[in-house]
Image (tube, grey):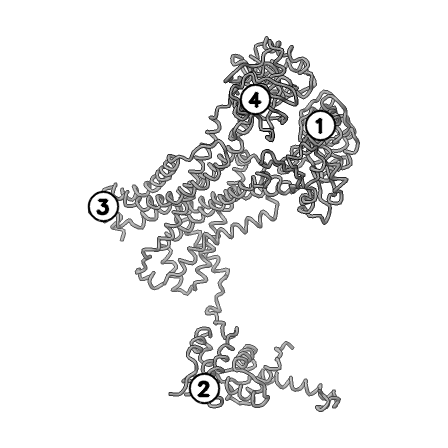
């Protein structure tokens, strides 16, 4: 099956969009990722990743409501598409199956 | 008020960010700023803001969405439409199309011709496999403080180079000059030029052997023939192993036949090669010479060894001759150097020991002229297209209104110019094909269009593409920028300065043309000036015959008596060299009051008693040689230049010492122009004492027809010298050949000047007709109000006359500078007088008026009722 593959960063962004459930836009995603992973991500990276994901058809977007702190500008809200969801599930399954076959050979303590 | 993000950063973002993404990106950035403001404070937030904005300089945010995602620029349907419209436009405005295409075709044709010529020039000798490894040994010698560069070498040079510098050279080949010899097979006799070369020559020159091998010259009595020589001697028979008699002295066996060398090769007129050792058989005195290093008479060619650079080898052999010459010759300080084959032809001139170029100047000159002529044609194209822009403007408006984007319009205009250029290119090829024979004649070449060469087509196409880009760029970029609303509403008016570039281009055209006119006039004046120079003898009816066998010389007195009796010649004599070049010079002269340090080298020619009478010497002082004075065998007739050089007050009777023998000056003649007609005549001496058996010189009796006289001379010559073919040359023709080079340049510049003017006038004609058409209504109104034909004419002509006048002002100093530099080369040169400029300016002006007047008068004659009713 022909399928677009996801980079690790794209996968994180996609997951974050899914977690934020309809309230996903640039700033919110950035803050969420910083909080959850501690990675020093920047706004422009998130925008670029969202742009790529949208091109791949993993997310869809629409313009939301303007707010005051945005100077009256609207935000673009993102949602995971069915295709994006399926991709995430597949990634999860592949990993699970590999982890299953690994049979505990790697322990977090010794993995480094 | 709440702190705001840095304004400049915001502006920057607005500038680079794609508009459709701006809102969300800016919104996010502002929200982030507000968040950071609360977290880290104002200045840190501002810094972060800057960093974030710069972070957005990325392809996704820079890229604008393409507006016409459905219509690609190169849609085949649209291209078909462009071509259709282009063809309709061409056929609708026939006059414009003809002017455009004819002008472009002429320009491209010239550029093609010049391209072929330049290619031919720079590929000279490249047929030799070892082209970049072959060099000729030359020497710089100092005479009276100035350095002369000679090609001639003493004959032991080759041996020395081989033995002492062997590691630098793969091959060293001694060679004679290209000499005439009679080759005979049975009763077939031909006078052919060839060289005596050492046996490695065929290998070095990578001759393509059709028969035999490159080892052919190893046999001391052998000869290699070029294909055409073999054919003219043996017809279709196999020449291998056959015997050829050379100068009826000895027999040589044909050991090989090589393919004729191409015309643009340094050795193209070498029609046979014979072994080098024969030089010593012909000139048995060579081996007896006490000091073989004192006589420079041969050429030395070398092929560099692998990994040896030309510069290094050249530096190493510098003193190779100096080490061997006698003490007395050390003052000339002979220094050797290598002149590479790649520079023999184009960089052949040396001045004071420094290579100063040569033909390469003409490669540049004509290359530049070619580019200019092509540029003139492109300018026509641009001018006519922009001039007609107002008409096409409406089409542009409609196309834009219907949905064309600018890119499409640019594409349209480019495809239109491509079409015109394509047609013009085909025409140019036709023109070149037709004019090539004539051009070859003028340029003294044998060129042809390399139809089968992919390089030619690639270059031709590239060149066509380039032309259409240059020619089409202005209309494409200019016309496509029109605003549809203005054009369609009719309020579109080209501004006052819209025609400025057009005018500038016309000025460029006429500057080039006028410069070329002035150049042509001056080149011809220079040739005429040198032709009118008094030559010091009478060339008319003077015929010379090279005496290749010595039979004639032995019976010369009988031959002379017999010929004079037939009435074919009025006088005849013998001489060592022809009257049109110097064959022999000597140095060891001294005279009363000579500075002992002065080194001289005078042309010194052996003649027979009647030489002066035959050529028509003009005596200033003294008398000619006479049979009545036995002492005349130790006498000189000298020219005025010699008297002046030696500073003799009373030259007649003075003694000149020549190698210890006293010679008395018996007569002084007016300078005889023997060498270049552009240079001063060298101090020259004539004597009876030297051998004079090389040339028979005859003055044909003017009362007898030339052909009849020649027939009579031929029969008498044949009787006494049956071996030698009767080959004669007219002295005036030989003398005329001295102008060949300048005349060729003259003819070529004339050709280019005429073309440049033709193309410029075509353009002017088109522009004038456009202006007349544009001002139809104005002229109508003027006529109604009482303007005369003359008024209208001057109204329309004034602008153009002004442009040509400006061009003239620019062209004058340009031409003066370049031609002044050119004339500097000649010692005898014409002056650049003011009337040349006046004539060129007047001519250009007259042509302009003629061209413009046709349109102006037609416009002036038009019935105003018709022109005013049309709206």
Mark 4 and mark 1: span between their CA atoms? Answer: 30 Å
- Asked if the residues shown at circle 4 and circle 3 are in contact, with their CB atoms under 8 angstroms apart, the answer is no
Label 3 secondary element? helix
Task: Categorize mark 1 by other alpha carbons within 10 Å: few (<14), some (14-19), many (20+).
Answer: few
Q: Are the residues flagged by discs 4 and 1 in contact, CB closer than 8 Å?
A: no
In the drawing, does residue B155 fall left or right of residue B580? right
Q: Secondary structure at mark 2?
A: helix
Secondary-structure class at tag 1 = loop
For the residues labelled 3 and 2, say whether their Cβ atoms are less than 8 Å apart: no
Q: Earlier in the sequence, mark 4 or mark 1?
A: 1
Numbered circle sitting on residue B408: none
Label 3 vs label 2, nearer the camera: 2
Residue at the disc numbered 1: B235
Count of picture labels? 4
Disc 2 target residue: B42
Q: Which is more N-terminal, label 3 or label 1?
A: 1
Q: Quadrant of the N terminus of chain B?
A: bottom left
Q: CA distance from mark 1 to mark 2?
A: 104 Å
B161 relative to B663, above or below = below
Query: Vertical placement of B252 versus B758: above or below?
Result: above
Say which of B137 and B863 sits in front. B137
Residue carrying label 4: B730
Residue B801: image x %, image y %?
33, 43
The residues bearing labels 1 and 3 have C-alpha atoms spaced at a distance of: 81 Å
Q: Which residue is mark 3?
A: B783
Q: Position of residue B334 (x, y in %)?
A: 66, 37
Depth check: B450 or B690 in front?
A: B690
Mark positioned earlier in the residue sequence (3 or 2): 2
């Amino acid at each position: 099956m022909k399928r677009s593959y996801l980079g690790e960063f794209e996968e994180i962004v996609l997951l974050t969009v899914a977690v934020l459930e309809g309230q996903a836009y640039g700033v919110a995603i950035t803050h969420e990722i910083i909080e959850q992973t501690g990675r020093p991500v920047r706004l422009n990276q998130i925008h670029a990743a969202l742009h790529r994901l949208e091109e791949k058809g993993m997310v869809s977007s629409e313009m939301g409501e303007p707010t005051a702190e945005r100077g009256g500008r609207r935000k673009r809200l993102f949602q995971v598409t069915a295709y994006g969801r399926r991709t995430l599930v597949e990634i999860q399954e592949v990993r699970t199956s590999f982890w299953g076959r690994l049979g505990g050979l790697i322990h977090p303590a010794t993995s480094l | 008020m709440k702190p705001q993000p840095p304004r400049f950063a915001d502006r920057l973002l607005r500038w680079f960010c794609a508009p459709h993404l701006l809102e969300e990106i800016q919104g996010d950035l502002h929200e982030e700023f507000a968040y950071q403001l609360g977290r880290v404070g104002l200045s840190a937030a501002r810094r972060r803001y800057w960093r974030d904005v710069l972070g957005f300089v990325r392809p996704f945010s820079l890229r604008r969405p393409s507006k016409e995602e459905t219509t690609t620029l190169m849609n085949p349907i649209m291209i078909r439409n462009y071509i259709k419209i282009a063809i309709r436009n061409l056929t609708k405005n026939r006059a414009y199309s003809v002017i455009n295409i004819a002008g472009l075709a002429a320009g491209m044709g010239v550029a093609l011709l010049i391209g072929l010529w330049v290619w031919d020039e720079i590929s000279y000798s490249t047929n030799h496999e070892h082209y970049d490894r072959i060099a000729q040994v030359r020497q710089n010698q100092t005479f009276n403080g100035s350095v002369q560069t000679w090609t001639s070498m003493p004959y032991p040079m080759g041996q020395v180079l081989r033995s002492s510098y062997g590691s630098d050279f793969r091959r060293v080949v001694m060679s004679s000059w290209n000499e005439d010899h009679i080759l005979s097979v049975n009763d077939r006799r031909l006078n052919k030029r060839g060289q005596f070369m050492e046996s490695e020559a065929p290998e070095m020159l990578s001759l393509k052997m059709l028969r035999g091998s490159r080892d052919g010259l190893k046999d001391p009595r052998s000869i290699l023939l070029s294909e055409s020589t073999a054919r003219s001697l043996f017809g279709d028979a196999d020449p291998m192993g056959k015997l050829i008699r050379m100068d009826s002295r000895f027999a040589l066996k044909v050991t090989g036949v090589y393919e004729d060398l191409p015309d643009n090769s340094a050795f193209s007129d070498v029609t046979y090669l014979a072994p080098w050792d024969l030089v010593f058989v012909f000139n048995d005195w060579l081996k007896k010479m006490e000091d073989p290093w004192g006589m420079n008479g041969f050429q030395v060619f070398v092929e560099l060894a692998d990994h040896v650079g030309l510069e290094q080898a050249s530096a190493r052999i510098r003193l190779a001759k100096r080490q061997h010459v006698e003490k007395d010759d050390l003052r000339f300080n002979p220094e050797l150097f290598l002149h590479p084959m790649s520079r023999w032809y184009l960089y052949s001139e040396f001045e004071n020991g420094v290579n100063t170029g040569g033909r390469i100047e003409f490669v540049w000159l004509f290359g530049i002229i070619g580019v200019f002529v092509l540029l003139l044609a492109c300018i026509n194209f641009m001018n006519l297209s922009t001039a007609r822009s107002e008409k096409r403007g409406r089409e542009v408006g409609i196309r834009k209104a219907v949905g064309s984007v600018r890119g499409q319009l640019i594409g349209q205009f480019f495809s239109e110019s491509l079409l015109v250029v394509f047609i013009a290119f085909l025409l140019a090829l036709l023109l070149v094909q037709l004019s090539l024979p004539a051009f070859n004649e003028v340029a003294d070449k044998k060129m042809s269009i390399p139809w089968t060469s992919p390089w030619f087509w690639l270059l031709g196409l590239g060149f066509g593409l380039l032309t259409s880009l240059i020619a089409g760029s202005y209309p494409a970029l200019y016309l496509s920028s029109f605003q549809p609303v203005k054009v369609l509403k009719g309020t579109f008016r080209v501004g006052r300065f819209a025609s400025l570039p057009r005018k500038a281009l016309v000025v460029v055209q006429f500057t080039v043309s006028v410069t070329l006119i002035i150049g042509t006039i001056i080149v011809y004046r220079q040739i005429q000036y040198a032709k009118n120079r008094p030559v010091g003898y009478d060339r008319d009816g003077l015929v010379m015959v090279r005496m290749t066998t010595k039979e004639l010389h032995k019976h010369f007195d009988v031959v002379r008596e017999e010929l004079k009796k037939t009435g074919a010649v009025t006088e005849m004599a013998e001489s060592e060299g022809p009257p049109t070049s110097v064959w022999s010079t000597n140095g060891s002269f001294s005279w009363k009051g000579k500075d002992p340090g002065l080194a001289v080298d005078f042309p010194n020619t052996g003649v027979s008693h009647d030489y002066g009478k035959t050529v028509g010497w003009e005596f200033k002082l003294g008398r000619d040689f006479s049979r009545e004075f036995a002492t005349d065998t130790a006498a000189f007739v000298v020219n005025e230049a010699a008297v002046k050089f030696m500073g003799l007050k009373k030259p007649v009777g003075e003694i000149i010492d020549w190698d210890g023998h006293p010679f008395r000056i018996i007569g002084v003649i007016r300078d005889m122009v023997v060498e270049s007609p552009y240079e001063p005549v060298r101090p020259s001496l004539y004597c009876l004492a030297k051998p004079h058996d090389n040339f028979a010189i005859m003055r044909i009796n003017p009362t007898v027809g030339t052909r009849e006289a020649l027939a009579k001379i031929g029969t008498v010559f044949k009787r006494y010298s049956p071996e030698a073919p009767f080959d004669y040359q007219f002295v005036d023709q030989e003398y005329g050949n001295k102008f060949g080079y300048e005349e060729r340049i003259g003819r070529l510049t004339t050709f280019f000047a005429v073309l440049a003017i033709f193309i410029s006038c075509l353009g002017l004609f088109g522009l004038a007709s456009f202006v007349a058409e544009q001002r139809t209504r104005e002229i109508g109104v003027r006529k109604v109000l009482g303007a005369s034909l003359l008024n209208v004419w001057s109204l329309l002509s004034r602008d153009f006359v002004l442009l040509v006048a400006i061009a003239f002002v620019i062209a004058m100093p340009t031409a003066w500078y370049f031609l002044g530099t050119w004339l500097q080369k000649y010692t005898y040169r014409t002056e650049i007088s003011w009337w040349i400029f006046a004539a060129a300016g007047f001519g250009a002006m007259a042509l302009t008026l003629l061209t413009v007047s046709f349109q102006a008068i037609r416009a002036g004659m038009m019935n105003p009722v018709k022109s005013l009713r049309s709206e």
